[in-house]
Image: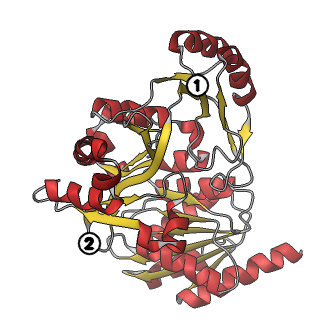
Amino acid sequence: MNIHEFQAKQLFAQYGVPVPKGKEIKNARAAEKWAAALDTPVYVVKAQIHAGGRGKAGGVKITKNKEEVPGLATELIGKTLVTHQTGPKGRKVRRLLIEEGAGIDKELYLSLLVDRDTGRPTFIASTEGGMEIEEVAENTPEKVLKEAIDPAVGFQSHNGRNLAFGLGLPTLEPAVVKPFFQMLENLYRLFMEKNAALIEINPLVITTDKQLIALDGKVSFDDNALYKHPAIFKFRDLHEEEPMEIEAGKHNLNYVKLDGNIGCMVNGAGLAMATMDVIKLAGSEPANFLDVGGGATKETVAAGFRILLKDKKVKGIFINIFGGIVRCERIAHGVIDAAKEVGIKLPVVVRLQGTNAEEGRKLLAESGLKVEVATDLWEAAQKIVALCSKKKKA
């Protein structure tokens, strides 16, 4: 689960990470009142959406005149920002963060995530703050530092020293070395205590008066751990999420919308990934990732159908089930009942393998539904791609 920048900075402040003084704003009147109360030489007005690249898209405004703040707020609230992360549809701005500016001397990059290679929480740091870390890693990889933390012992002083010396702080900015150590320790504590998946500060600035400030903030959390953090869960903004993904969550389905035309319904994440790959190999594109889980029922299958059919790009549905925990004839009954209930008019190909697969295929063949049955994954993928091609030509 992602949260907004102003929410991330609230958490930073709770954990002793310095942030600019700021406030969430939802209208011009509130912006005017807050600008008067803030009384700073520089005002920064930031659109709050779950996407990077806001500045380049016109979502960050800076002024030295507090009288201009309400006008900037009016300009941004309700605007649709299109960035490299939003896609062409963009995201509508519903709230702002208005905060004090900072006298910037240097910009650094700092993040904390779990490194898949080591399986450990790992700090990533760079002297190239304010830039996309992917670009830095590609063009100047020597400027990207990594420091893995052993979770058995936690953050240690040598971890801080490695990063500080790697960034050249003891030589160039000795006044911020100790605060930098403390910030790293605080961020690690936040990461572990709140089950975060990512913490990113870009840029982390050193001000002209030698203070460290998190000028930006991005935090995301492990969805599976949110039940332990009700206060964090309240940060969820449904406006920033795909409606079909929200509905899928209500039925305990794992759904991610993609840009293709073949809807996929699969049990098991690994099988779902393989299914998407084979659809591409057969010459088409998957419209989604949809995992109905190992214990799929008539109700979950019906819910899956409804979600797939809401996507206007879907021209056909590919159901790929391996009967292990759940038997294939139960899935077949669920498909038949759900198909009749939902009223599917699109081409459907069902591939069943595993426990009672033959019985399940027989039930589907004798159901009277216009459902193609397959035993082989490649055969099934070719069938659904061919059927969707025919439908498109027709």
Disc 2 target residue = 118
Residue 183 appears left or right of 255: left
Residue 251: image x %, image y %?
46, 49
In this rendering, does residue 64 appear at all? yes
Q: Amino acid at mark 2?
A: Thr
Q: Is residue 173 above or below residue 34?
A: below
Secondary structure of the residue carrying tag 2 is loop
Residue 9 got which mark?
A: none
In depth, the one of 97 and 310 nearer the eye is: 97
Secondary structure of the residue carrying tag 1 is loop
Q: Earlier in the sequence, mark 2 or mark 1?
A: 1
- Could you give the CA–CA distance between mark 2 and mark 1, rounded to whole angstroms? 43 Å
Residue that extends furthest to the front in the rendered view of this protein: 171
Q: Amino acid at mark 1?
A: Val
Residue 203: image x %, image y %?
48, 47
Give the label, 2 or 1, closer to the camera: 1
- Residue 42's quadrant in the figure? top right
Q: Is residue 327 above or below residue 95?
A: below
In depth, the one of 31 and 346 nearer the eye is: 31
